[in-house]
């Protein structure tokens, strides 16, 4: 049986060149800085580590809420 995942494909990588953060264009991802990459259809959205922390915190909150709803529905 195949199990569906609610989490999209993500990875942490080092930037090979300078980029702007997808969430905030004022945030610059310099060459060799770590960044979060999130799969978006055929492309990868790139986020600075500051925005990555916010995204991960939001994901944790959403996951906790879904778990609470699941437990309450039993």
Image: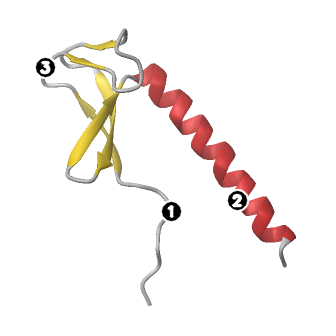
Q: What element carries label 2?
A: helix
| Name of the residue lying farthest toward the bottom | 1
**Numbered circle sitting on residue 36:** none
- Asked whether disc 3 touches disc 2, contact meaning CB atoms under 8 Å apart, the reply is no
- Asked whether disc 1 touches disc 2, contact meaning CB atoms under 8 Å apart, the reply is yes
**Gap in angstroms between the C-alphas marked 1 and 2:** 11 Å
- Residue at point 65%, 53% (across, down): 63
Earlier in the chain: of badge 1 and badge 2, it is 1
Earlier in the chain: of badge 3 and badge 2, it is 3
What crowding class fits label 1: few (fewer than 14 Cα within 10 Å), some (14-19), or many (20 or more)? few
Q: In this view, does 51 lie to the left or right of 37?
A: right
What crowding class fits label 3: few (fewer than 14 Cα within 10 Å), some (14-19), or many (20 or more)? few
From the top left corner, tell me how far across and down residue 62 is, in percent.
Answer: 65, 48
| Name of the residue lying farthest toward the left | 16
Q: Which of 3 and 43 is in front in this view?
A: 43
- Which residue matches tag 3? 17
Q: Please tell me in which quadrant of the rendered image residue 48 appears.
A: top left
From the top left corner, tell me how far across and down residue 39 is, in percent.
Answer: 30, 48
From the top left corner, tell me how far across and down residue 31 is, in percent.
Answer: 18, 16
Q: What element carries label 1?
A: loop
- Residue at point 20%, 52% (across, down): 42
Q: In this view, does 51 lie to the left or right of 43?
A: right
- Residue at point 73%, 62% (across, down): 67
- Which residue matches tag 2? 66
- Colouring mode (rainbow / by chain / secondary structure / one colour): secondary structure
- Which residue matches tag 1? 6
| Name of the residue lying farthest toward the top | 26
Earlier in the chain: of badge 3 and badge 1, it is 1
From the top left corner, tell me how far across and down residue 16 is, in percent.
Answer: 13, 25
């Amino acid at each position: 049986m195949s199990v569906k995942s609610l989490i999209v494909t993500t990875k942490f990588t080092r930037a090979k060149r300078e980029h702007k953060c997808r969430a905030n264009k004022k945030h610059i991802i310099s060459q060799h800085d770590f960044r979060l990459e999130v799969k978006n259809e055929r492309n990868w959205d790139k986020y600075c580590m500051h925005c990555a922390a916010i995204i991960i915190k939001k994901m944790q909150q959403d996951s906790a809420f879904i778990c609470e709803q699941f437990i309450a529905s039993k």
